[in-house]
Image (spheres, coloured by chain):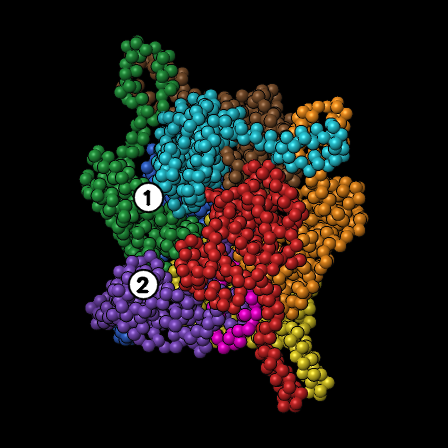
Chain colours: A yellow, B purple, C red, D orange, E cyan, F brown, G blue, H green
Amino acid sequence: MDPARLRELLDKVREGKASVEDAVGQLKQLPFADLGYAMVDHHRALRQGAPEVILGEGKSPAQIAGIAKELARTGQNVLVTRLDPTSAAEVRALFPELEYKSEARVATFVQTPIPTLGRKPVALVSAGTSDMPVAEECGETLRMLGVRVERVYDVGVAGIHRLLHKREIFERTAVAVVVAGMEGALASVVGGLVTTPVIAVPTSVGYGAALGGLAALLGMLTSCASGVTVVNIDNGFGAAFAAARMLRV
Amino acid sequence: MDPARLRELLDKVREGKASVEDAVGQLKQLPFADLGYAMVDHHRALRQGAPEVILGEGKSPAQIAGIAKELARTGQNVLVTRLDPTSAAEVRALFPELEYKSEARVATFVQTPIPTLGRKPVALVSAGTSDMPVAEECGETLRMLGVRVERVYDVGVAGIHRLLHKREIFERTAVAVVVAGMEGALASVVGGLVTTPVIAVPTSVGYGAALGGLAALLGMLTSCASGVTVVNIDNGFGAAFAAARMLRV
Amino acid sequence: MDPARLRELLDKVREGKASVEDAVGQLKQLPFADLGYAMVDHHRALRQGAPEVILGEGKSPAQIAGIAKELARTGQNVLVTRLDPTSAAEVRALFPELEYKSEARVATFVQTPIPTLGRKPVALVSAGTSDMPVAEECGETLRMLGVRVERVYDVGVAGIHRLLHKREIFERTAVAVVVAGMEGALASVVGGLVTTPVIAVPTSVGYGAALGGLAALLGMLTSCASGVTVVNIDNGFGAAFAAARMLRV
Amino acid sequence: MDPARLRELLDKVREGKASVEDAVGQLKQLPFADLGYAMVDHHRALRQGAPEVILGEGKSPAQIAGIAKELARTGQNVLVTRLDPTSAAEVRALFPELEYKSEARVATFVQTPIPTLGRKPVALVSAGTSDMPVAEECGETLRMLGVRVERVYDVGVAGIHRLLHKREIFERTAVAVVVAGMEGALASVVGGLVTTPVIAVPTSVGYGAALGGLAALLGMLTSCASGVTVVNIDNGFGAAFAAARMLRV
Amino acid sequence: MDPARLRELLDKVREGKASVEDAVGQLKQLPFADLGYAMVDHHRALRQGAPEVILGEGKSPAQIAGIAKELARTGQNVLVTRLDPTSAAEVRALFPELEYKSEARVATFVQTPIPTLGRKPVALVSAGTSDMPVAEECGETLRMLGVRVERVYDVGVAGIHRLLHKREIFERTAVAVVVAGMEGALASVVGGLVTTPVIAVPTSVGYGAALGGLAALLGMLTSCASGVTVVNIDNGFGAAFAAARMLRV
Amino acid sequence: MDPARLRELLDKVREGKASVEDAVGQLKQLPFADLGYAMVDHHRALRQGAPEVILGEGKSPAQIAGIAKELARTGQNVLVTRLDPTSAAEVRALFPELEYKSEARVATFVQTPIPTLGRKPVALVSAGTSDMPVAEECGETLRMLGVRVERVYDVGVAGIHRLLHKREIFERTAVAVVVAGMEGALASVVGGLVTTPVIAVPTSVGYGAALGGLAALLGMLTSCASGVTVVNIDNGFGAAFAAARMLRV
Amino acid sequence: MDPARLRELLDKVREGKASVEDAVGQLKQLPFADLGYAMVDHHRALRQGAPEVILGEGKSPAQIAGIAKELARTGQNVLVTRLDPTSAAEVRALFPELEYKSEARVATFVQTPIPTLGRKPVALVSAGTSDMPVAEECGETLRMLGVRVERVYDVGVAGIHRLLHKREIFERTAVAVVVAGMEGALASVVGGLVTTPVIAVPTSVGYGAALGGLAALLGMLTSCASGVTVVNIDNGFGAAFAAARMLRV
Amino acid sequence: MDPARLRELLDKVREGKASVEDAVGQLKQLPFADLGYAMVDHHRALRQGAPEVILGEGKSPAQIAGIAKELARTGQNVLVTRLDPTSAAEVRALFPELEYKSEARVATFVQTPIPTLGRKPVALVSAGTSDMPVAEECGETLRMLGVRVERVYDVGVAGIHRLLHKREIFERTAVAVVVAGMEGALASVVGGLVTTPVIAVPTSVGYGAALGGLAALLGMLTSCASGVTVVNIDNGFGAAFAAARMLRV
């Protein structure tokens, strides 16, 4: 039941065309979301200047282009994640306005200006060059959410001086996203250096006992730095969303 | 090398009593943390009104009481976590000022007023009554960090109406901490309802395929709600620290 | 907002004391479950003649007795599961009317007659004598749900003739619950013999590679018999509830 | 020993051509299944209007077509599951009557009308669009078993209002099949909303900590909703068979 | 249907009191195992001179003594495995004839002479002194099965000369049982030295990455020596039974 | 040091050309295997009429053909296992005498008659048609070892009558090899039916919770039938070698 | 801040152009690694005659060639690891001076003579021919680090005489690197034979319960030989670096 | 066969009392280790001034005291590891000369002076105070092996300045042993700071996702610092032995 129909019913009550009991009966049946308001509020918050996000993995190029076009038609910005180069080429043949960034494996279409979110940027820290696709997925998602980003790449703990050298960055950023594979130790070191929120993103970089990212995941969850939080392996997108949630506090 | 000694060296350079080369040589050896300033700043931020935290698990009552007394002697507030009732009784025999809360398994000693942190409270949501020890560890830690808490307990997803009934709480809180064992689904549902940060705390409640909390942990990490972050199993303390980091954004 | 308040609002609309717009505004805020009707229906169905269930594990005897007494006070029957003998003695000291069955590790209190559920009984099949506590937890829960039970114990597949000898039981029962530890193969054999629903309950019986019931769990999930469903390790209670759901079809 | 030979032996006994002792001796040797009756009964129940099912995975197109043709020759309906598009094309080149549904990855051939099974339909609920192949495997299997289906797709718990909006469907269906990947929380929410049997199907949708469907599997097994039963990861076929077993109760 | 009832039916057929069709009908219902012959044969083979075996773990002393006495009453020998010293004392208070061997954690009662099984003894090899309980459980079970044993203990691969020094034992034994915890490498070395069957028994000896015996289990399963077979962790009893099966070849 | 050189040294001692001390010194250095006799004996036993075995997996066609030709040159029979069709074609282009059996994924070359091993055949039992490659790898290896085989395929426990129907096969075979994927329950049922050795071979057939054969492996290790032994997943070759070891007892 | 800038600041202090307080302020900000000396020392030690190492896996041929050329331009030697033949061909098209060794999957470019490291060679021991790629990755890395190598390949424990035959090699080497897959038992046997450091390298050779190298890894970690250390699965490179660290002791 | 008997045989050959052929025959049977020299050499190296080590875990106090006394009787020093306080008291009642160190859980008896091993000490680094028992087990074992130790405790990476402050210790030590639980990141940081060998010891400190030390173990195995080696969880003893092996290079 949408607000129009609700008004219609209340008008009938007011005009005596419907009894109070009838209205109670109908309103009791009122499905929660039919009003749609709660989620609309929620969705509006999410969508103001923010992209609709399409998980590219597991969808055909035709499906991706179809959804993207539909979203674009309504004036929204579009973000497609986990899109490999081959699929990207096919999608762009169908929807050429999409811009593809191979390093981040994302495609974006911006037609509506994105308002800035947060007073300070997010620090985006990664351990090694192989973690870059995940870091860039995070970076591009942040950009589409209106969040400014300061990147500090390739500062893994095996050369701890590299991180310490760049540590002043944490004084001018509001949240730190730490992207690391293998043993994922960078999250603990950053967590010990800063008082801002730290979002740890384990990556599937590594082999053998890295267990596809589980070693980094377990390491980040058991970090000896207090108050580090963790997202799923390779989930740069989720880390960006989490950071956006925090910037709204 | 503390600032005093640094000044002394520079004075010698200024006065010509030490050559520039000598000073370069000495300063090159300068251990990073000897200045101590960075960590001091960091630590001060953490410690302003905040408790020193002692992990009770794996320490003897005598050790716990000793550390607690030492901290108390310097005027600080004290928080001991993961303290079982038997140990607590022994610790309190040695340090009677400690107040023990058995449900949270924490002991606290507050001698310095705790300044309020954050403009809004934190929503502390738990799925079942068995999750209460972890939730309360979080709640007590938040209290010691100066964070106000609104509790919503026993709103597991098997009776989803219980959560929906209380959902307005999320409009007046800045961060949601969701504590749940078994399948941990509550984090996803809350994550879909709110735009604030959501910190998911899996608990070891459950048996068999719950695998000591791993089922809830994996579930929360793969949440279909975007931007939910996760801490270690049963880590109510860590969730509280993470929330405090976010309230400072 | 309960029906009374809803009526009050609609009366005001009818009488012109509240504008339609105001009413739309208020009704939009209407929390879903405040009406409470849907869940009440659902709960009534669950509770008609059925026991309130208290998971004994992880609760103190005082807590268990307190909850049980409160439930009993409202005229309901009571079932406490996973209650070890020591706790049971303490609980019964506080609430002597509870009857304890040590083999099933359950305590029950029946003051309201339990209507029979289902046209046929449930076949309760177990592989070995060590599986009996789980089987009996299921059996007692079924009894409290009004379901008749036919037991076939100790018919593990290492002596397949024992099961075949008893197979006519499946012709007069509506659902088969199969309780087995170790490799849990009994579920596949029963699944191949019958056309009724088969609920497989892995138990933690076994050692080493049994991995606390995981071997049986995995075996039952990958059963070569089509359409066997599985519940958590040692979850006799859950199997009984699942059977009751099926008897209502 | 088939019935004909059995009759022949008994005729000899009647006619005095065989002694009772001889017949006892022969009958003692009687292999159980030689009579075949038990399984025939069982199989007949399974096969009335139901398809013979061929697991396509791991078979060559020639093998699949061969088995399908042989089954079709005897007048039966045929269902091939887990058949990828490439193999499907090759199979259909050999047996063009097979109809392929790429979304469900199944091929079917119906020559005998399928009698309706069950008084009410089955509710087929899925969390996301990526779960559709598994859901449709279930849906197609149900169709071939004569079961009517009501689909409710894309109602994952991150937007709980979507499910609540559709909840009246559960009042007109006899069994709920819930298909979900990632954390699989939908099964718990549905399990809390309905009194019908709930069959949870974890899917391998997700990455990282989803562990190929294990996260959803563990979550469903430890559901806080009582009496939810679970089948193997991606086993839409098994869920359909389980539902059919329940509809016969 | 036992032979007596079968004879009765055939008599009726012979005498014309039952028609052939009636008899076919009744015989079709004939439950397989009612004749009992197959399993009797099988069981007789197992039981000739062999002990009835009671798994002591998970049974109360009263239950163990009760079963043991019942078996003893029928003239059989008795073997109780996995019996800890405390329980053993209680059991022996009830059944003093039982002899307890604490190192093997078994209790035995021999009243019937045990015929020798196999032309050669079994070589019982263990890696370290901590593996002795499992090795002795195997040794005692072999003794009760009538199998002679040659023990070679404490010949782990870290001092490979110890095993090589004793290698001539394998020339006069028919089967080698190798008991080893930690990495379980002894099975591979023995498997490479001998042409007899090798039964590898992983033990739960070790800590950390030994994972309760899983490391040894995996190591033995992936042995680079061809044709080594494996039993469950700590399953000395099973290894003895497997050896007995082999000695009958 | 070979026997010739040993004799030469001893001759020198006898002739006084070498002192006893010198000889002691040289003999102390004597590498164990230089005598070679022990292993020669062992190897001779293995090689009499038996094939040299080449694990095809992980070797290039050129390597496989090279090793095979070298072995063939010395008059031996050759067995290549785990050889996929593409590689097989390339290998046969280089060594056309090799005969390839695609179902077993093995290639063989027999130039020396293979003496029969064992007084009775081995029963080769498999659960489903998908287990056939592993079963046939075992069957072909047995053939190359001179062991006769009786095959009983597709007798999985979901239709237990199929196995019971064929059970007399176990009376005329010396060892049972049971090949099964999914839950692997067939090994327990066979183990309960026979007194011969049972070698269980888990296969990687199945998906989801089958975990690539781990479910079957765990199930077989925890079999409720006493004395079943297990080899690695998909290791048909190892099971054949183990059977051959047993036939020599 | 590099030494030049440090001197400049101190000069200003000496000359009175900067106050002591200003200098203290600036020096307090002094990022640790700006001096760079510590790491330079460390790096110099690593780089003297040693190669810069590029992990080929996960990089494009263009990236690899680019980095390699850049390193070569500064006069350094270059080592690329985990480089498959296809990529190697592409890389060499861009940088033809690189020499590719397919067995070791490494490419090297040596323009600066490599000084010898260590007084004795390293013993490089492998269990089977399939372990050779990992062993050779180790061997090539050792060569590039200036370490001499003595290879002992194909001495797995299933034929223990092969290792014993070669054991004198350990008397003339300083460190033993043991490369083995499957059960990895070779590390324990070598560990028991020698007093030098033993570095165990598990490989992913094997299938089924080998679990991609985890069985070997767990076996090596739980080795019954005291003081064996372990590196990651397939990490021949890491073992070489560890050996080089030890040779510098 | 010991050297004396060998001489006797050779004397007979020299004197013509034994033929060359007879001697060849006897020497061919010569069990490898009968000469005992190789292992004696090896053992001597291990035992010179070094303790015999008794693993206390899993042995009775009487057994421990018995072995310790026997070793002491032959003049050797004794080290008992993993000895809890209760057992230690009982052992010392039987062998009062043993000195017990509760923090290290070891008991020692030194009667023979221990020669110093290594030109430099070993750096013993631990992350937190809870890691101390494992670190001290290592430290005490090093002491008994004659190795000097420099301890750096409580320098976990969450406060990285603590480690950097102490880093000069690594310039005067030959090997670094790094003991850390939880995420074990300290090993990577130390590995990046030093060029000496780094032996990482994961501990079981932590809870939940620490998985009893597996998180730290996996993290250390996948360390981004090149050439870090790892021992089993909590294996301080093994790390000490490994360090001693390295000091002999």
Identify whether D35 is placed above or below D91: above
- Give the amino acid type for the residue marked by disc 1 in the picture: Glu
Q: Residue at x 43, y 22 (%)?
A: E172
- Quarter of the image with the N terminus of chain A is bottom right
Q: Position of residue A240 (x, y in %)?
A: 52, 66
Residue B222 seen from this side: no
Is label 2 on the same chain as label 1?
no
Using residue F30 as the reference point, say whether residue A88 is left or right of it: right
* E148 vs F182: above or below: above
For numbered disc 1, what is the local secondary structure?
A: loop
Which of the two residues, A39 or A166, is positioned nearer the viewer here? A39
Element type at mark 2? helix
Q: Which mark is residue H57?
A: 1
Residue H52 coordinates in the image, percent (x, y): 27, 38
Determine if the magenta segment contains residue D229: no
Specify few, some or many for label 1: CA neighbours under 10 Å numbering under 14, 14-19, or 20 or more.
some
In x, y percent, where is residue D131? Answer: 64, 58
- Which label sits in the foreground, 2 or 1? 2
Label 2 resides on the chain identified as B
**Which residue carries the number 2 mark?**
B88
Q: Nearer the viewer, residue E162 or C176?
A: C176
Chain letter of the residue beneath label 1 in the structure image: H
Above or below, A118 relative to E148: below
Image: magenta residue range: B157-186
Residue at 30% over, 63% down: B89
Image vertical order of residue B2 relative to residue C11, above or below: above
In front here: H50 or F154? Answer: F154
